[in-house]
Image: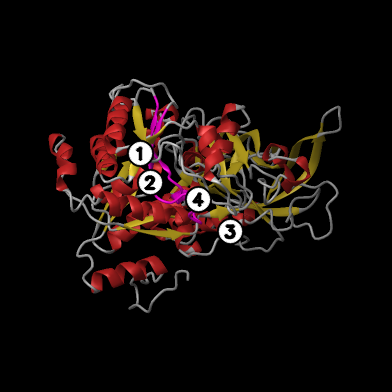
Amino acid sequence: MSDSPASTAAGETPEKRDFIRQIVREDLAGGKHTAIRTRFPPEPNGYLHIGHAKAICLDFGIAAEFGGRCNLRFDDTNPAKEDPEFVAAIQDDVRWLGFQWAELRHASDYFDVYYLAAQKLIRDGKAFVCDLSAEEVRQYRGSLTEPGRDSPYRERGVEENLDLFARMRAGEFPDGARTLRAKIDMASGNINLRDPALYRIKHVEHQNTGDAWPIYPMYDFAHALGDAVEGITHSLCTLEFEDHRPLYDWCVDNVDLAGHPELLEPLLARGLPKEAGKPRQIEFSRLNINYTVMSKRKLTTLVGEGLVDGWDDPRMYTLQGLRRRGYTPAALRLLVDRVGISKQNSVIDFSVLEGCLREDLDAHAPRRMAVIDPLKLVLANLPEDHEESLTFSNHPKDESFGQRQVPFSRELWIEREDFAEVPPKGWKRLVPGGEVRLRGAGIARVDEVVKNDAGEIVELRGWLDPESRPGMEGANRKVKGTIHWVSARHAVEAEIRLYDRLFTVADPDDESGGKSYRDHLNPDSRRTVTGHVEPAAAQAAPEQSFQFERLGYFVADRRDHAPARPVFNRSVTLRDTWADKG
């Protein structure tokens, strides 16, 4: 079941009716909860990608819609792969998308609680210290068709287990020598329940706790108890965690933090609220978009092998990359709303993402003129020192954007593709002896084509009809085409980065035929040209977006742009140029 708007009064936002929100409504109506609490729990081992945008919008959105609270909690239980750089970027991404967490938490805030909880499970006969190696554990686990075998260490006594676990905590044993495992069911049809590891030995310094802990809890254990510690009511995660839900519930139920408040005592020393609840895990389909890869491993490889220019390369589908490309928070939120929330996995066409950006920028991006493949047009009937200022609207659909002055002179830059010496059938732009309307300036004609020794066109010389100027009697004279321009005397030279999709095929993850995603990289995903922009565009602030008339939507690069040396990234073309490629 996906989103379907409920009826609302005119002007009100439609009520979202996806299955998760229906569960929340029923829980509130039935008195199961009086307040809603959610969390967004990323592991800080990489940059967030567009798939995370769906989880962020859902976790924070539901909390906001129902007057609840959403925490940002870093799942920092694997310090060997985590980095403060990723922590800072994740916080930046969440804020950029338009959300603010109620509290910033870390799994490491609860290491003492997890340790006490593990001891409780040992005392209850529900956990044991295992000496099997990782390879031996795999051999003992069984398969989807065969049950696993009990570890030879499964029946160790409680006191021995408590002693060994304390010595693991004290750092006596090397990495991988022992694990603490839950004692559940080695014959379970769900392999996640075949005595899963709860703790492993890892002598790695932690970014928050230093070298205080030589053991670290496993994800399933820490995640479930972290939700319980924070009183999370609805733990929302993607469908790949559906098979983990029985283990999630086992950890919550068998530790029972709510019934054993003494396990929460370490929180008081840190000034954290001593609370606990029983969360409910609910799974939803992840956001899959064609022409992309979202595997953190593959994204890391793209960066590490220099196939892209870092995590914020505008061709990357990280949130940092999309932001630098010119994608807006509103466009990504619109995408999430448009895709909806369901239990059904599906692949969204990339054009849906681009369409959301076009829709947002069409309404909110001011218009400017720029030329990215310049050809000079000299209006020979104007004086050499001719100079004037023309008034242009900043947005044709919204007068509140106001107006600007655009300089006009005898020499103009026009797009090279707007002139054809031998025009194809149906051509409506400039030809030798033909006329075209110069946007907002009048009607021009080409009289002479100037070429260099190689036969390349280097300049056009023509004439501007003085009766077609704005306000003149012939200003409305009809001609077939209208082109844009910038004054060569006043325009600012700019670096224009023409970005396109990073991959040439819809499913770059498809490794049939012996190919990998590397083989499908689009060689034309970035092309850099030197263009010219009107002065008002050059003065843009970093991250300011414009529609460059007739060319597409562009954004001032957040790192490299400066008014004296403008750098613009193409965010998206005006229309879908891939529709005929698929």
The magenta stretch is 178-202
Mark sitting earlier along the chain (1/4): 1
Q: Residue at x 57, y 30 (%)?
A: 303
Mark closer to the observer (4, 2) = 2
How much space separates mark 1 and mark 2, taking CA atoms?
Answer: 7 Å
Foreground pick, 377 / 220: 220
Q: Does residue 41 appear in this view?
A: no
Q: Residue 128 shows which numbered tag?
A: 1
Say what amino acid the circle numbered 4 marks.
Ile
Q: Which mark is residue 183?
A: 2
147 left or right, relative to 165: right
Q: Which residue is mark 4?
A: 191
Q: Secondary structure at mark 4?
A: helix
Label whose residue precedes the other's in the sequence (4 or 3) = 4
Instruction: Determine contact: label 3, label 2, CB under 8 Å.
Output: no
Q: Quadrant of the C terminus?
A: bottom right
The residue positioned 58% from the left and 52% from the top of the image is: 146
Give me the C-alpha separation between circle 3 and circle 2: 41 Å
- Seen in the picture, residue 178 relative to 469 is either above or below; the reply is above
* Magenta run includes residue 302: no
